[in-house]
Amino acid sequence: MPYMRLALFLFLIKHKAMTNRSTDLKAIRPIIASAIVNDSMTSEEQFQNKTLRPIIKLQNDLLVAVFKNYINKHKNVFYDLSLSKQLDYIENAIHKDMKFRNSLKGMIIGQFTIEEYGVYIQNSSALNKRMMNIVRERYISNIQLLQHQVVAKAV
């Protein structure tokens, strides 16, 4: 009998922890006024606007820092490229470097609730494409943050 109480107690704690995690994750996400969700949208569009866009906005500073590290690990060649070549570099990093791409996906998927993860795995291929396109657009809109910072030295 004490084992059944312990099992019930542990179940309730686990259930409460999962509920709190979902609530906490959703509570820290920014609200995006333009991210409209309605019944006429596909389920992918709804997931993109309700889940992906807020998470990616929340993770923006981390995503920028990760890309700066990526640039550094690849010998800083990004900084010597023209703007159009920098855009190609971003595109290639996100779409062709599977290790980097998987790292980005992990930073986003790790912010999903259990319920959102259930939706995600039903159509992960299409949602991954949307996810990476949003990240790419974030990098492009933050391209000035990606520029090499030159610190002036006092003489």
Image (tube, rainbow, N blue to C red):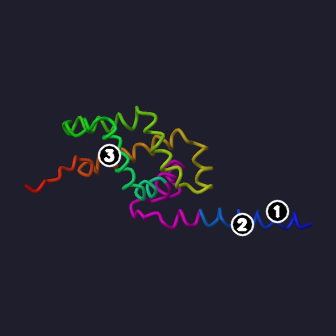
What residue lies at 54% left-to-right and 50% top-to-bottom? 43
Q: Which residue is mark 3?
A: 68
What residue lies at 7% left-to-right and 55% top-to-bottom? 155
| Quarter of the rendering containing residue 6 | bottom right
Under mark 1, the amino acid is: Ala
Magenta span contains residue 97: no
Residue 132: numbered disc: none
Q: Real-space Cα distance between discs 1 and 2?
A: 10 Å
Magenta residues? Answer: 22-51
Secondary structure under tag 2 reads: helix
Sequence-wise, which precedes: disc 2 or disc 3?
Answer: 2
| Quarter of the rendering containing residue 104 | top left
Above or below residue 59? Residue 136 is: above
Q: Which residue is mark 1?
A: 7
Can you give x and y, in whole percent of width and height, for residue 14 in the image?
A: 71, 62
- Residue lying at the far right in this picture: please name it: 1
Can you give x and y, in whole percent of width and height, for residue 125 in the image?
A: 53, 38
Q: Real-space Cα distance between discs 2 and 3?
A: 40 Å
Can you give x and y, in whole percent of width and height, for residue 68 in the image?
A: 32, 46
